Amino acid sequence: MDYEVSGLPMHVLLVHATVVFVPLAALCTLLSLLWPAARRRLGIVTPLIALLALVLVPITTAAGSWLLDRVDSTPQINAHMQLGGTLLPWVVGVFLVALAEWLWFRYGGTQGEGMRRRMGAVGSRIAGVAAVVVALVVCGGAVATVVLVGESGSRAVWEGSFRTGADD
């Protein structure tokens, strides 16, 4: 596939969407889990945003691989490429947490009540705390990885490419 749009590598365009939608999916997932009013308002939107982020990551990575074949290889570009490869598992986790959370609150109804009775108050609290911890780790890992990948990409492109002071 040709990853080029009007002479511009598509990776440059896709990166911006990925940088927006991965943290947005993480934020919506955490808000939906921790804030019932947000959960009611966001509804199915949260797992849909997470799905969009999940679809964007491999497309952005493929466009980056296409671009890699067309630029000079440097240590910064190689570091960016390696970091970029670590994002997908985190985004898969965000999607799975967002989907599981939506399904639980949407369809858990009577089954959820029966499970809570069997687990008891302590077991229910432990399960709730575990769900929050998993969501925090997965969403935090996804956002942190996006920041690291983006920072390494910007270093690969811009480090040594501009002057810090204006020539007047």
Image (tube, grey):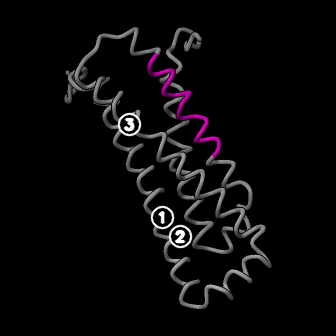
Measuring 55% from the left and 36% from the top, which residue is drawn there?
17
Assess disc 3: are there few (<14), some (14-19) or many (≥20) residues with their C-alpha within 10 Å of its C-alpha.
Answer: some
The residue pinned by badge 2 equals: 131
| 63 drawn magenta | yes
Q: Position of residue 25 (x, y in %)?
A: 57, 51
Classify residue 51 by image quadrant: top right
Q: Nearer the viewer, mark 1 or mark 3?
A: 1
The region drawn magenta spans 51-65
The residue pinned by badge 3 equals: 150
Q: Position of residue 50 (x, y in %)?
A: 61, 48
Kind of residue at disc 3: Gly
Above-or-below relation of 160 to 85:
above
Q: Earlier in the sequence, mark 1 or mark 3?
A: 1
Mark 1 → mark 3, Cα distance in angstroms = 24 Å
Kind of residue at disc 1: Val
Specify whether residue 57 is in view.
Answer: yes
Q: Nearer the viewer, residue 139 or 161?
A: 139
Classify residue 4 by image quadrant: top right
Mark 2 lies on a secondary structure that is helix
